[in-house]
Image (cartoon, coloured by chain):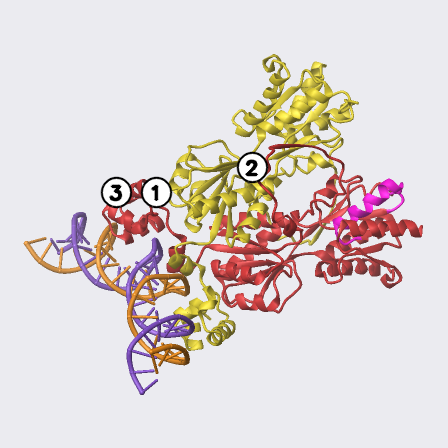
Chain colours: A red, B yellow, C purple, D orange
Amino acid sequence: MKAATVYDVAAHAGVSIATVSRVLRRPGDVRASTRARVLASVQELGYVPSASARSLAARRTGVLGLFFPSIDDEENQAEAVFEQDTQVQLVVDIPDTGEVRPPNLYFDEVLRGSEREAWRHGFALMVGVGRGSNPAAMVNDIAGRVDGMAVLARSVPDELLDHVSRRIPVVLIAGPRRGDDYDHVSVSNTEGMRALTGHLLDRHGVRDPVYVAGPADSPDDAERHLGFRQALEAAGIDPAALPVLRGNFSRVQARAVAEELLAAGTLPRALVCGNDQMALGLLDVFGPAGVRVPVDVIVTGFDGIDAGRLSTPRLTTVHQPMGDLGRAAVRAMLSRLEHPDQPPITSRLPVKVLLRESSEGASA
Amino acid sequence: MKAATVYDVAAHAGVSIATVSRVLRRPGDVRASTRARVLASVQELGYVPSASARSLAARRTGVLGLFFPSIDDEENQAEAVFEQDTQVQLVVDIPDTGEVRPPNLYFDEVLRGSEREAWRHGFALMVGVGRGSNPAAMVNDIAGRVDGMAVLARSVPDELLDHVSRRIPVVLIAGPRRGDDYDHVSVSNTEGMRALTGHLLDRHGVRDPVYVAGPADSPDDAERHLGFRQALEAAGIDPAALPVLRGNFSRVQARAVAEELLAAGTLPRALVCGNDQMALGLLDVFGPAGVRVPVDVIVTGFDGIDAGRLSTPRLTTVHQPMGDLGRAAVRAMLSRLEHPDQPPITSRLPVKVLLRESSEGASA
DNA sequence: CCAGCGAATGTAAGCGCATACAGTAGAGGC
DNA sequence: GCCTCTACTGTATGCGCTTACATTCGCTGG
């Protein structure tokens, strides 16, 4: 049972292959009666057009690509076993450390936004998540299949990016600038953090906020840290006079930071974290230790992940419109496809500061 | 600047196109020196092979498809606006109802599992999420692009499924049986619920558990309900003697159910819900109403979603291996591609009963 | 020194479709 | 009754690559 082709349908309907093609692409160009005959044949033969052939002939694939880095530990679960002899297992499930499932929900939302926007414009979406081995093969593979490609952060080395960008337009999502030939989409990291910090200074009278930073090589963290410092300067406070804590964006690492703070015995009025994970890590330690948030110390995050909505107290944070990021990336690709020669565009999406109980309630 | 082709590379390297192709597909067949020359040309010209042409010639695309139904309200956010004039917005975020973002994290996990397994086997993955309008076009489109396709639940009408399955193998994920020609992957709904219910009967001495059912047309719920009844019968209890509550799988609907129960003034010893959402809905009402869980009433769910791990009390539930579902689906497709004529296979993945505080702690 | 052979490379024929261009059949105008 | 114009439909080419087959090259054994 080989798959039916245009030739089969044409023969079955008694027309030429051109007519079959027209019925599918530009139905208006075909007389209604023959159109019906062709469609009947399509139905009867179970014909589904080959996208490969179509793409080749039409010189466009109708697919957009999305490439993510992988941050979780997928490698080690690679060989999970399916062949258990038992269908059900009873487990007394003790509360876990919170680190079990790293919420790269971040990606999920970007993905959903992209997927949606792509189909809305008649494009399919192909996803690749970079694995340890060599992203090169995967990126090349994807690049060969799509009309445009969006790449998250710095998941792809520069020269590889250069290489594929000679074939298709490439859009960078939420990463640092890389050359001036690419389109970028990102969020207002600096402005968001500046607004949040400003709120703490102005409304809560905080004078000694301490920044809990992410990895030194994170451009996102750098931008946020910048916003933090700008707010301080605007309030006449010297940022250099305040300590900075290294948190690495991870929850466990943040717990260690919290322990140290407690050991030192001196808490600042506010701890401003570069992301939500670290803020949650602090809460993990403060709660059991009897440190009251926000009475004894204010804690804030950045990202707006779900867990921050479910924590106790709920986390004040800066919400990034992840879904919109994906959608903006798709729009950027489409725009570039339509106007190949327009100058590179960088779009910054607005963020939203969410004031919740980890900062509010301490003041009047 | 047109994209380079094999011809360009061949000319540049002074070889025939066949040699270029070989260098990329079967490097061992080419002398090392010429291989190096060709690769240099590839690099210099920024050559990325066209997957369309390759797929057409090779008669396989190297892509697997995944089709989801859409359960969330994406339609109305379709026209979200990007052009705000403000980059930051300050919002006092009040605790929400919990219904804001329907956790179709279910899909995300299936997707991640599939994506991972696909690339592991050298296949790319293409995703489609069924939108209101017509899934037909999307499914057909995907079917034309892939070597095999997995479809979630009943997201695709039977005749469309028949149509595309004449071109490529189709695997059904977690849905009801549909004809006997498809491969299926699903989880042990019945066994899981039977085990959980049995635990309540045996360990907690429950004699009158009430089942909170999902939609009447949900095959998943039907299987779970069956497991519930089987456990009762095994314990010598007549299921027909006990009431069943309709919950529709939704959290808000479950809250209404809880209100009614409270109004009636009589609570059973245990409420066994067809999914986690409904169990959480019950908790939403019981907590504020002063009903102690699990002391006054035991509540259990099914699915193992994250929110059940973060609720108070934490939810006893049956955890489905979502990621494994996706991976199993991919394996099924690959297996089918390799052995087109093997009889249809149905694989059931094992589940895990997670005993947490919404059921434990009441007994000894 | 030459036949013979394997390795390396070239030649050429599609893969299934879109589409420019050519052709055909009516319908209307004269 | 003939010509013109429009509306369809058919013919033929090529998209960029894989691959069976033919060819050439460089050696080896006789």
Residue at (68, 15) in percent of width and height: B207
Chain designation of label 3: A
**Would residue A41 be found to the left or right of residue B90 on screen?**
left
CB within 8 Å, label 2 to label 3: no
Q: In the rendered image of this protein, does residue A8 appear above or below residue B233? A: below
Chain designation of label 2: B
- How far from the left and from the top, in percent, is residue B111? 57, 45
Residue pointed to by mark 3: A33
- Which residue is nearer to you in this view: A292 or A334? A292
Q: In the rendered image of this protein, does residue B235 appear above or below residue A161? A: above
- Which residue is nearer to you in this view: B260 or B225? B225
Q: Amino acid at mark 3?
A: Ser
| Element carrying mark 1 | loop
Residue at (47, 31) in percent of width and height: B177
Q: Kindly report which numbered mark, 1 or 2, lies closer to the viewer in this rendering.
A: 1
**Would residue B135 be found to the left or right of residue A228 on screen?**
left
Q: In the rendered image of this protein, does residue B141 appear above or below residue B226? A: below
Give the residues in magenta: A273-297
Quarter of the figure with the C terminus of chain B: top right
Q: Amino acid at mark 1?
A: Gly
Mark 2 on the same chain as mark 3: no
Residue A17 on the magenta span: no
- How far from the left and from the top, in percent, is residue C1? 31, 87
Cα separation between marks 3 and 1: 20 Å
